[in-house]
Image (cartoon, rainbow, N blue to C red):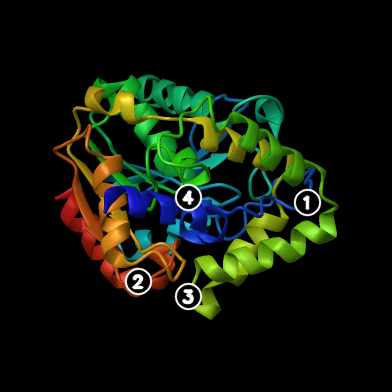
Amino acid sequence: MIRKALMIAAAAAAAAAGMAVAAAPALAQSAGHHDHGAAHHAHAAFASDRLHVMVEGEGQDVILIPGLSSSPEIWQGTVDRLGGGYRFHRVHVNGFAGAPAGANAEGPVSAPVAEEIARYIAEHGLQSPAVIGHSMGGTIAMMLAARHPDAVGRLMVVDMVPFMGAMFGPPGTTAESVAPTADQVYAAQSGTPREAYLAQAEQTIIGMIQTESERAAPLRHSRDSDQQVSAAAFRELIVTDLRPELPAITAPTEVLYVKFNDPRMTPEITDMIYQMSFQTLPGAELIRVDDAAHFIMLDQPDLFAERVRAFLD
């Protein structure tokens, strides 16, 4: 049964939008920083060529990390619903949603961004902050918690597994064996003309957000992102296997996820894949959210905020 589930997962990888983490990446190069919907937030005093941080509120420290080609704006509904008692630190990764590429213009993105967040926590004296990451942000959050366990008080991963590359190959796929596939994906994403990217992005995001009225902002974020940064970041996700590092995580961990967006991927198969993916972190609480796609916070905003509040409490 497990082998069959993995075979189905491999066959469905290209269509599984819930795991593709924005397979249609940023579709336009941006020279400026537009920061839609967030102009009223204060920027933290933190010099970095890989990210900047918007801070608001007072209370328990909560770091929010968006996904590939996403903006901190995706957390606005959650922040509004949680209300007072929290100090939110919303990370904006350079190269995404209007922020200039900076140092993310070359090489990996997730790993160095995780190191910069660790530096931010140390320089600002944050004491055991909660860290919540969506999609690629979940990968960054896992890297942070595994490589700097004393810096993270609680960890929430939203719709991301520790080795996305497993979805791009047969059972037994490793980071090394999936590298040629990752190179092909990178070449396609970085070299496809912009208009083709725009068309692909629209279809991909439609599959990632069930609520039609919530699609416009993520589409805008994707258009305002740097194509090369997103392509490189996506390749990095495919070849990054964090499963061996999960035992280093000491923070209480919760994983929220949805059924893979493919008719062959039943809820039961999805559950099995997540259980296997996180088996090296046996204390993690895995919770499937129904009636939602990849952007859980947009499709189920009230339920998501309730889960986050319970997680923080």
Q: Is residue 46 visible?
A: no
Rate crowding at label 3 as few (under 14), some (14 to 19) or many (20 or more) other CA atoms within 10 Å. some
Q: Is residue 130 left or right of residue 139?
A: left
Q: Amino acid at mark 3?
A: Gln
Mark toward the start of the polypeptide (1 vs 3):
1
Earlier sequence position, callout 2 versus callout 4: 4
> Which residue, given by chain and number where applicable, does mark 4 sit on?
10
Amino acid type assigned to the residue bearing label 1 in the image: Ala
Q: Nearer the viewer, mark 1 or mark 3?
A: 3
For the residues marked 4 and 3, what is the alpha-carbon distance in whole angstroms? 24 Å
- The residue that appears at 28% across and 29% down in the rendered structure is 246
Sooner in the amino-acid sequence: mark 2 or mark 3 = 3
Disc number for residue 28 = 1
The amino acid type of the residue labelled 4 equals Ala
> Which of labels 4 and 3 is toward the front?
4
Q: Which residue is mark 3?
A: 210
Residue behind mark 2: 300
Question: How far from the left and from the top, in percent, is residue 294?
Answer: 44, 61
Front of the two marks 2 and 4: 4
